């Protein structure tokens, strides 16, 4: 069987129906094999950096694995950014790189890079050594990508293999990866601590999303009457309109949220590695009784020493803990109202941001985000880029579902908002998808406006434009001897409406709350991709400083 056909056969057999990439001469045999089928789609991006971000958005919002294809060297290296983002976020992807022919390797053939260049940006880097093992290798790659902790797997396919017609080793039957067994003794001990706690709290991370554990999280939180704080990657795994929702632990978390964590007498950290980014270099104070549930043994004891460490799937562990609590003879000891504790944190956040909401154009990011949240359907999927406005969004833009809010994790790369929205819309064709981005982030992927038009995807792109790298300019002026708004373009502003129109996209500008509501409402109702540009205040305070005061 021809190798290129076998690659596509195994993708489809493993449930992969969307491949993101940019065609090159080296990949054309694979593109031909995809193009001759109607059960798999090839989405053509305009830059390889966007390819892996698109696949990431697809997987993050659907829970399904996605695939990418790039040419060697420049294409592969451009895609590395998104692969590292997916690695940090435990997002399953299978990334195909067309490799230099083995006979030419080491001779500086066109685009040649040593295959081990990519070892540190993927869960596993597999180089196909013999064409006969193609089917088995792809099955193995898919299995690794989907086995917790999930992540991207790179498969190097030598160019000359693709058109070979060889007998293939038998492919395995695809099967869903199984989760680890939840350790009974640790579950029992965790339940005892939580039953004895008077002020329990749950800190929920992205592992809750990966495990499909939202229902288990809600049930356990309600049984314990425990406030729920999420990490930035866990945002949305607990509905933020729930009485027990206490906000997001990030660099901009308020003192009141940090106090709520510190004043708890037991914290269940579930689905989180408690990394240095979310805990401010492990400076966030957690109580002496810390129960940590994670799928990766390397996470335990990295920044905090847990009282109880449980290596298990987040949903399975929470269900087991709740079952043990339910079977106990005594009710939880909680003597404080969890909803009141959560409400106190939400009220403090509202008081802190109140001065930033009553603004005149150009509006603050906080004001715009609140208007957008009110204007958008509650079930809309929001793909949020990195940048200063994203830090505000963690505090002020509510997420109501586990896959309704996408943002980059500790890699925090800019330029993800638009391409991840494209991936999200392809994965969720019947759901409104909105890209929230700043002018800085959009300029790093502005070419993908054309991809949205070419693919006829009805995404709404909202760009908060302050003509500045404002989060950098603020720090430059506050902490260094640099000019105020040192990295702004106030004398050379960009008209994103004109840029979008030039690529065939509908575009409008909205600067007041009523204009934003109208523009966004109309944009999500249309079947065409639409850009809404909102001018924001470049001199607004940045969340990390404002929320700490």
Image (spheres, rainbow, N blue to C red):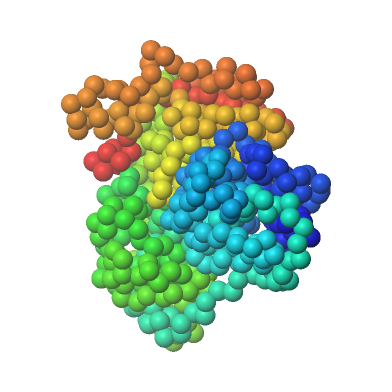
**Residue 146 visible:** no
Q: Residue at x 39, y 63 (%)?
A: 273
Q: Which quadrant would residue 541 be assigned to in this image?
A: top left
Q: Is residue 210 above or below residue 439?
A: below
Q: Residue at x 52, y 32 (%)?
A: 445
Q: Is residue 88 above or below residue 181?
A: above
The quadrant in which the C terminus is found is top left
Q: Residue at x 33, y 24 (%)?
A: 487
- Nearest the camera: 211 or 65? 65
Q: Which quadrant would residue 307 be assigned to in this image?
A: bottom left
In the picture, measured across the screen, residue 471 lies left or right of residue 414, that is left
- Nearest the camera: 33 or 157? 157
- Nearest the camera: 501 or 432? 501
Q: Residue at x 63, y 29 (%)?
A: 450
**Residue 504 visible:** yes
Task: Name the spot of residue 374 as percent of width and height, x first.
Answer: 54, 37
In the picture, measured across the screen, residue 454 lies left or right of residue 225, that is right
In the picture, measured across the screen, residue 431 lies left or right of residue 80, that is right
């Amino acid at each position: 069987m021809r190798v290129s056909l076998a690659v596509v056969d195994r993708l489809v057999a493993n449930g992969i129906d969307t491949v993101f990439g940019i065609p090159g001469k080296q990949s054309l045999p694979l593109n031909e094999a995809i193009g001759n089928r109607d059960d798999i789609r090839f989405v053509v991006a305009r830059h390889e950096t966007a390819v892996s971000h698109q696949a990431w958005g697809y997987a993050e919002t659907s829970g399904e694995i996605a695939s990418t294809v790039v040419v060697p060297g420049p294409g592969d290296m451009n895609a590395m950014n998104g692969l590292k983002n997916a690695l940090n976020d435990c997002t399953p992807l299978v990334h195909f790189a067309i490799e230099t022919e083995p006979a030419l390797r080491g001779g500086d053939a066109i685009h040649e890079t040593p295959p081990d260049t990519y070892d540190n940006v993927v869960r596993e880097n597999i180089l196909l050594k013999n064409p006969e093992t193609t089917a088995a290798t792809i099955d193995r790659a898919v299995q690794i990508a989907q086995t917790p902790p999930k992540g991207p797997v790179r498969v190097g396919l030598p160019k000359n293999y693709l058109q070979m017609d060889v007998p293939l080793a038998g492919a395995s039957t695809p099967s869903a990866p199984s989760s680890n067994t939840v350790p009974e003794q640790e579950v029992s001990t965790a339940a005892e601590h939580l039953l004895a706690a008077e002020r329990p709290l749950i800190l929920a991370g992205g592992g809750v999303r990966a495990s499909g554990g939202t229902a288990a999280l809600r049930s356990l939180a309600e049984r314990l009457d425990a406030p729920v704080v999420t990490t930035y990657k866990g945002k949305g795994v607990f509905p933020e309109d729930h009485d027990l929702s206490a906000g997001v632990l990030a660099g901009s978390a308020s003192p009141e949220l940090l106090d709520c964590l510190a004043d708890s007498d037991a914290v269940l950290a579930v689905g989180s590695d408690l990394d240095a980014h979310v805990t401010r270099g492990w400076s966030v104070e957690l109580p002496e009784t810390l129960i940590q549930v994670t799928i990766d043994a390397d996470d335990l004891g990295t920044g905090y020493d847990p009282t109880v460490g449980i290596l298990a799937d987040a949903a399975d562990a929470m269900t087991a803990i709740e079952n043990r609590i339910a079977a106990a003879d005594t009710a939880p000891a909680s003597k404080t109202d969890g909803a009141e504790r959560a409400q106190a944190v939400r009220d403090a956040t509202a008081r802190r941001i109140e001065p930033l909401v009553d603004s005149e154009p150009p509006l603050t990011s906080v004001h715009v985000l609140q208007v957008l949240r009110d204007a958008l359907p509650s079930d809309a999927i929001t793909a949020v880029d990195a940048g200063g406005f994203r830090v505000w969004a963690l505090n002020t833009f509510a997420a109501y579902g586990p896959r309704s809010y996408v943002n980059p994790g500790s890699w925090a790369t800019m330029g993800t908002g638009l391409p991840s929205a494209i991936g999200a819309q392809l994965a969720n064709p019947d759901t409104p998808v909105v890209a929230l981005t700043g002018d800085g982030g959009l300029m790093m992927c502005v070419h993908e406006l054309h991809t949205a038009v070419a693919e006829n995807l009805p995404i709404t792109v909202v760009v908060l434009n302050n003509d500045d790298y404002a989060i950098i300019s603020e720090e430059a002026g506050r902490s260094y001897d640099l000019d105020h708004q040192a990295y702004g373009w106030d004398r050379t502003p960009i008209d994103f409406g004109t840029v979008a129109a030039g690529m065939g996209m509908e575009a409008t500008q909205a600067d007041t709350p009523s204009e934003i509501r109208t523009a966004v409402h109309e944009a999500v109702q249309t079947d065409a991709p639409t850009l809404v540009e909102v001018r924001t205040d470049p001199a607004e305070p940045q969340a990390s400083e404002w929320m700490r005061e």
